[in-house]
Amino acid sequence: MNAVKYIRVSTKDQNTARQTIKNTPDGNTVLEVVDKCSGTIPFNRRDNAPKVLKMAQKGDIDTLLVHSIDRLGRNTLDILQTIKEFTKLGVNVKSEKEGLETLLDGKENPIAKLMINIMATLSEFERERILERQAEGIQKAKERGVYKTNGGNRVPLTLQAFFNKEKNARCLKELKRGESLRRAAALSGVSLGTAQKVSKLANARGML
């Protein structure tokens, strides 16, 4: 087995220890590839994930290990597209947490496919519920008159600091590529409102 262990964490300060390889079977070659980015960024647009795809295309690996299936994406479509691409290349995607394998004896595992659909859908639903609860909390704070739009004591960002923020920089990059506001927002993990602000400020400064 020639395998890659793909590790993704959301922030640069987040520990990857719980996703690292604990037991490597004798004789197996396992390479660790790490991305530190938002899960909302599609797999093939991350910094290091495309390298794994290239290895699969060259036939250098036959197994992709992940701690859990959500490391591949945060929405059903992205996860399934990524798995489908690896499956076509004959790469078995193995999720340690869920105990799933997408290929059995070289053939697509129908049970794993069904479970992945269900888990990805539930994950997306939970994320939407979290956003809803956050919005409800903000609304209640506004009604009580205790909500501050600038976060209380935070100093407003300068234009340079605004564009230096990782997600905003990614959003600007996608806009420069010709992506729509909604598409750029989704790819960079920012809200549509932030994408609109990025576009407005960038146009005003001649950056678009």
Image (tube, rainbow, N blue to C red):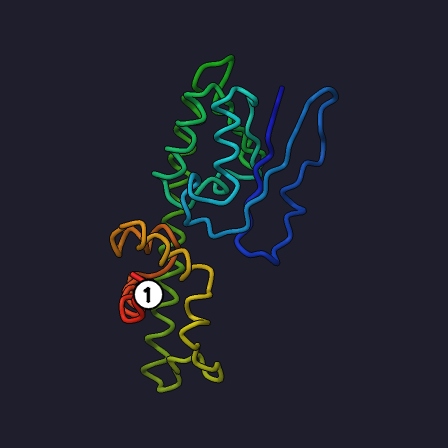
Q: Estimate the x, y position of residue 204 in percent, counting from the top left.
A: 27, 71
User: Is residue 92 shown left or right of residue 83?
Assistant: right
User: Is residue 37 shown left or right of residue 27?
Assistant: left
The one nearer the camera, 96 or 106, is 106
- The quadrant in which residue 96 appears is top right
Q: Estimate the x, y position of residue 176 in percent, counting from the top left.
A: 31, 54
- Single out the residue that lies furthest toward the left: 180
The amino acid beneath tag 1 is: Val
The one nearer the camera, 172 or 104, is 172
Q: Estimate the x, y position of residue 145 in percent, counting from the top left.
A: 35, 87
- Residue at 47% from the left image edge and 44% from the top image edge: 46
- The quadrant in which residue 191 appears is bottom left
- The quadrant in which residue 129 appears is bottom left
Q: Residues within 10 Å of mark 1 (few under 14, many from 20)?
A: many
Q: Secondary structure at mark 1?
A: helix
- Residue at 37% from the left image edge and 44% from the top image edge: 75
The one nearer the camera, 137 or 34, is 34
Residue bearing mark 1: 198
- Residue at 40% from the left image edge and 53% from the top image edge: 127
